[in-house]
Image: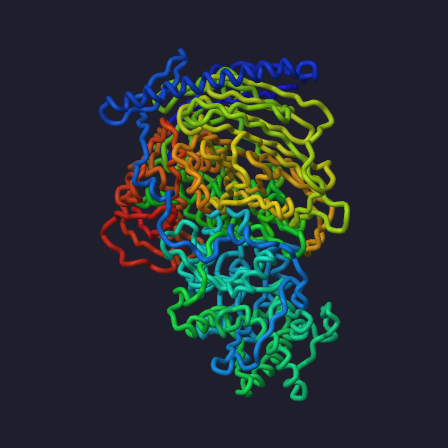
């Protein structure tokens, strides 16, 4: 094995990086040629030697852990006796630990009042708890007749005599922002024609209605139409003919998307609507995501929407809810003690959102009322009975036939108001289709409404027309709970549309892009915050004219590209190969631009004398930390070239709290010293960067020590392979249809394993044919040293119909229960259902999954969304990548054959549970520990290292920038500080949105001496003095997406947040 001519300096391992701060590091070196070393393969005969070596390493790591524990104890003692706050330990070259004078975090404990929330107990039980519903149902898939997955519906003809049936037919067109075609190709081929026809045809008859949801498409169309047409659109919206539903940039995937990006695309859409059309969405519309997360109703409710609609739910759940008239319910958060998170949700009852499956239970009849399928057109009815144009001669018979379907469908709901969607993918793209649908339906409505004996009133409507009529009928204010409607908690994963076809494959499909999504997301958050701060400081100094405000256009573009990728065929990995490339190019383009925004802001903020600031795009002051040569390549870290003169590094910590962190830097010589800003030596570890592969044996045991404790658990890991079925239906981009249980991964050659020890971290690297793993343990006080860092470089490009899984096995008695997160926002309890096939028991894992018993909890934290399960007690299993050679008959028309070399990054955290009990564990609610939350944020928002391009003596004076004047409470997270757009949307305004999240956490896992330098404050925070050197000019609490002010803007800057709540504030900094 050859060594690259680079070495890694993990500088500043005990380097206290301040919150969001830009810290300076100074490298002083003597130039010396790099020395080459070589390693070798381990033949089988040396495996026992290797085993001994690993056991020695384990012992060493345990000893290191004990040393750290003692250090923490002594620091705590110092804390008790010292005046003010003590500093963190650091390790000088002579090997003894000392406390640096300049940094001052302390080891603090959590206040007991903040531990009550996770214990729960308040509030009433919901009527429908999804975990209990799953346990109750037989999932027997009986044939239901014409409604194949349901049952026969009957009614008495006089049921509507006293209260007529009110029918709202809602025309819609589902436009995927990328799937079979790219976003732009769809726009030019179809979407622009749909919207042009809409504008023309809606004005022909004021009774016509239409709904639209994807603002990404709508904004592109808006940019291409005249002022006259824009005015016509505003009129249609104003008079209620055209409704903007949900109003997000896209209709997001709810399995793999992270809550930052879900909120960001919602804000982007809502801000666009408010600015351009002056409208605020009222109802949510999500007909196509493949399963539903309970995070979405929370976000919609906090955005002031009053109702929502969903469609792709497991057919057995639909049947059960239809039979019990529970298809409409108040969806409540599991952790909500009252009803403040309730939102009315309408679940569509049948197989699909197309016309054959929306008018009633019989698709053969409903298809006859899809007038795009009239004979002579390009599409027809699979049931062999075509539609017939409505005439005076046939209207009575046709209307009666349709009314029968309407009445049957209405029997599944509690009210006499009926919703009938009328549309499908990319419908209404030609004027002829508008005429066919609207004219024929209007003839039917006119007939029905002219016959009082039929007791029906039918009309076109928008989604909110339907919900408004429903609320009016039951006599309550929109947003309140209709009498008798059930309350539901939980989510709707995993989804099956027929038989045992579970849509659980897309939780992992195209993991390379799922990972790139999260990299872009963390860069966007960092860039937003730094840009907002730099602009505010420049404004305050009167230098905003010299600051590159044009960076705002780059931010807007990145928000929109990240938003676009949250679409349910993008991050899901279920688009055509060329479309995936198009998304990848957009993501990479924005990632590069965000690095520029970060560099420009960092440059301004670290300058000692701001008057010397000069923005030169051709010669940036700072270099990038890493580069990517193409949209599908892995990042390459920048090598800092050293000679006799010192080089400066600026380190950006994007987190709220100061913390100790390892910061890797590549240099071109082993002769290097790392110094702090004050010139003090910082502890560093020099390691080789290996060019060729290394790897780990399955079933090699790693001993994990619990955080701050002395007990040891055995945790083993192994790689497994799933095949797919040999018969007709096989796994594809959407579906996971394995050929039975996973088989052990058997590589062609024995593995090469390399063990590396060092003062700050030690690691075991192992290499197989298809996967390279690096397991690293940090010997650092604080959060980083309390979990195992596990990375897997996966390359299965020579596999055929195989899926690679990583399984952790432990002695934890978790039985059939495990926990997965929803969108990185909340935790959902899961139960392994033996009555369901293996693939039904996989769930999305955007951020973490854990198993536990009364003594211990093992958490797998992830930096990218993947599918996860626990198939046996004590196990956690994650699907790393899937390569599938065929389509799975869901419309894509391709397999998954464009696999990339992909890094999957994890943290494995083992914690002791101190006060757990069986009763509490049986509740469907659970929370991560504070340590787990903080570890997750560390994993997802790593420090960025930017080398200063200039060398001395031309270098201006630099100094560290610390934006926050106070330490934020441990459970507060600054989700975003997002500068709002000015009238000219390419420029920034003086206002920003500050979005805060207070996390819910479980105190029963907190081991002693965890090394937090923050505490909790019962949700209280003063924003007035939060930002160092800036004044808070104004503070207005608003709804989540800033559409509605909440209360009046007061002079008080003290805020209070309940656990789990996300709050948005419109602020002005200066």
Q: Nearer the viewer, residue 682 or 172?
A: 172
433 vs 1040, left or right, is right
Q: Position of residue 815 (x, y in %)?
A: 54, 38
Above or below, 1042 against 282 in this view is above
- The colour scheme of the drawn protein is rainbow
Viewer-closest of 611 and 934: 934
Quadrant into which the N terminus falls: top right
Q: Is residue 426 visible?
A: no
Q: For the point 51% across and 60% down, which residue is it?
A: 215
Which quadrant of the view contains residue 974? top left
Residue 63 drawn at (x, y percent): 46, 16
Image position, residue 940 (x, y; %):
48, 37
1063 over 352 or under it: above or below: above
- Location of residue 798 in the rendering, given as x and y in whole percent from the top left corner: 73, 36
- Give the quadrant of residue 680: top left
Q: Is residue 629 above or below residue 753?
A: below
> In the image, is residue 313 above or below residue 81?
below
- Side of 96 where 861 appears, left or right: right
> Would residue 131 be seen by someone viewing this image from the given angle?
yes
Residue found 50% across the figure and 39% down from its top: 848
Q: Residue lying furthest right in this view?
A: 727
Q: Tag count in the figure? A: 0
């Amino acid at each position: 094995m050859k060594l690259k001519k680079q070495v890694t300096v993990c500088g500043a391992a005990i380097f206290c990086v301040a919150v969001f701060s830009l810290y300076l590091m100074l490298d002083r070196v003597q130039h010396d040629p790099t020395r080459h070393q070589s390693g070798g393969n381990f033949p089988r005969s040396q495996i026992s030697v290797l085993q001994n070596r690993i056991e020695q390493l384990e012992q060493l790591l345990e000893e290191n852990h004990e040393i750290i524990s003692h250090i923490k104890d002594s620091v705590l003692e110092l804390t008790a006796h010292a005046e003010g706050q003590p500093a963190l330990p650091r390790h000088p070259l002579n090997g003894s630990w000392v406390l640096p004078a300049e940094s001052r975090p302390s080891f603090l404990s959590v206040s007991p009042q903040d531990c009550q929330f996770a214990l729960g107990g308040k509030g009433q039980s919901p009527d429908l708890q999804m975990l209990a519903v799953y346990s109750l149902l037989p999932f027997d898939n009986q044939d239901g007749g014409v409604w194949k997955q349901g049952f026969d519906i009957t009614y008495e003809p006089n049921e509507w005599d006293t209260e007529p049936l009110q029918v709202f037919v809602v025309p819609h067109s589902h436009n995927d922002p990328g799937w079979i075609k790219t976003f732009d190709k769809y726009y030019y081929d179809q979407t622009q024609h749909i919207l042009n026809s809409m504008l023309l045809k809606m004005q022909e008859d004021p009774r016509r209605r239409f709904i639209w949801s994807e603002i990404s498409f709508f904004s592109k169309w808006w940019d291409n139409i005249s002022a006259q047409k824009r005015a016509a659109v505003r009129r249609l919206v104003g008079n209620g003919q055209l409704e903007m539903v949900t109003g997000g940039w896209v209709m997001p995937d709810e399995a793999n998307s992270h809550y930052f990006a879900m909120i960001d695309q919602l804000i982007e859409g809502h801000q666009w609507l408010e600015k351009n059309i002056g409208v605020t969405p009222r109802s949510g519309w999500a007909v196509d995501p493949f399963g539903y997360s309970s995070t979405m109703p929370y976000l919609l409710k906090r955005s002031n929407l009053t109702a929502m609609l969903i469609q792709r739910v497991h057919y057995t759940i639909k049947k059960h809810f239809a039979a019990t008239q529970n298809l409409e319910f108040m969806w409540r958060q599991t952790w909500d003690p009252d009803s403040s998170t309730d939102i009315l949700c309408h679940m569509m009852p049948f197989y699909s959102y197309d016309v054959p499956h929306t008018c009633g239970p019989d698709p053969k009849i409903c298809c006859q009322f899809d007038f795009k399928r009239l004979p002579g057109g390009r599409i027809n009815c699979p049931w062999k009975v075509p539609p017939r144009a409505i005439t005076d001669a046939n209207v009575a018979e046709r209307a009666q036939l349709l009314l029968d379907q309407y009445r049957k469908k209405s029997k599944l709901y509690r009210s006499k108001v009926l919703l009938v969607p009328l549309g499908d993918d990319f419908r209404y793209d030609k004027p002829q289709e508008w005429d066919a649908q609207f004219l024929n339906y209007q003839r039917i409505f006119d007939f029905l409404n002219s016959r009082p004996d039929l007791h029906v009133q039918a009309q076109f409507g928008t989604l909110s027309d339907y919900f408004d009529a429903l609320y009016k009928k039951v006599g309550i204010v929109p947003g309140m709970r209709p009498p008798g409607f059930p309350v539901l908690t939980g989510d709707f994963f995993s989804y099956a549309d027929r038989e045992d076809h579970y849509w659980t494959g897309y939780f992992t499909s195209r993991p390379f892009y799922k990972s790139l999504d999260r990299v872009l997301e963390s860069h966007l958050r960092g860039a937003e915050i730094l840009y907002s701060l730099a602009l505010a400081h420049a404004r305050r100094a009167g230098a905003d004219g010299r600051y590159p405000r044009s960076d705002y256009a780059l931010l807007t573009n990145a928000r929109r590209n990240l938003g676009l990728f949250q679409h349910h065929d993008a991050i899901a990995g279920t688009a055509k190969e060329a479309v995936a490339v198009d998304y990848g190019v957009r993501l990479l383009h924005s990632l590069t631009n965000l690095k520029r925004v970060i560099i420009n802001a960092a440059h301004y903020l670290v300058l000692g004398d701001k008057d010397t600031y000069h923005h030169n795009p051709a010669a940036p002051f700072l270099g990038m930390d890493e580069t990517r040569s193409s949209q599908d390549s892995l990042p390459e870290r920048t090598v800092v070239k050293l000679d006799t003169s010192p080089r400066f590094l600026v380190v950006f910590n994007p987190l709220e709290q100061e913390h100790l962190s390892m910061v890797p830097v590549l240099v071109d010589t082993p002769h290097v010293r790392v110094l702090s800003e004050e010139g003090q030596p910082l502890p560093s570890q020099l390691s080789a960067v290996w060019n060729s592969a290394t790897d780990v044996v399955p079933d090699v045991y790693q001993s994990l020590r619990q955080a701050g404790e002395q007990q040891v658990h055995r945790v083993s890991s192994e790689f497994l392979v799933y095949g797919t079925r040999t018969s007709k239906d096989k796994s594809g981009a959407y579906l996971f249809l394995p050929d039975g249980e996973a088989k052990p991964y058997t590589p062609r050659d024995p593995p090469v394993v390399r063990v590396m020890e060092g003062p700050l971290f030690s690691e075991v690297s192992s290499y197989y044919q298809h996967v390279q793993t690096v397991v690293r343990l940090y010997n650092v006080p604080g959060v980083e040293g309390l979990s195992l860092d596990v990375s897997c470089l996966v390359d299965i490009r020579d596999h055929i119909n195989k899926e690679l899984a990583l399984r952790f096995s432990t002695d934890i008695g978790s039985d059939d229960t495990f926990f997965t997160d929803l969108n990185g926002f909340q935790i959902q309890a899961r139960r392994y259902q033996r009555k369901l096939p293996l693939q039904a028991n996989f769930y999305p894992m955007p951020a973490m999954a854990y198993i536990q018993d009364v003594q211990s909890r093992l958490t797998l934290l992830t930096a990218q969304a993947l599918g996860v399960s626990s198939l046996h007690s004590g196990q956690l299993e994650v699907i790393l990548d899937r390569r599938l050679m065929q389509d799975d008959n869901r419309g894509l028309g391709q397999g998954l054959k464009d696999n990339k070399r992909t890094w999957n990054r994890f943290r494995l955290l083992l914690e002791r549970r101190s006060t757990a009990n069986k009763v509490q564990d049986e509740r469907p609610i659970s929370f991560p520990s504070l340590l787990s939350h903080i570890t997750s944020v560390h994993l997802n928002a790593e420090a960025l290292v930017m080398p200063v391009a200039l060398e001395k003596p031309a270098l201006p004076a630099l100094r560290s920038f610390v934006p926050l004047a106070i330490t934020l409470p441990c459970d507060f997270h600054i989700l975003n500080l997002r500068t709002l757009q000015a009238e000219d949307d390419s420029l920034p305004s003086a206002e920003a949105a500050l979005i805060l999240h207070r996390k819910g956490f479980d105190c029963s896992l907190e081991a002693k001496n965890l090394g937090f330098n923050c505490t909790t404050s019962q949700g209280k925070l003063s924003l007035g003095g939060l930002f160092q050197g800036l004044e808070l000019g104004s503070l207005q609490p608003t709804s989540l997406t800033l559409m509605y002010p909440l209360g009046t803007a007061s002079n008080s800057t003290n805020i209070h947040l309940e656990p789990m709540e996300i709050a948005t504030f419109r602020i002005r900094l200066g």
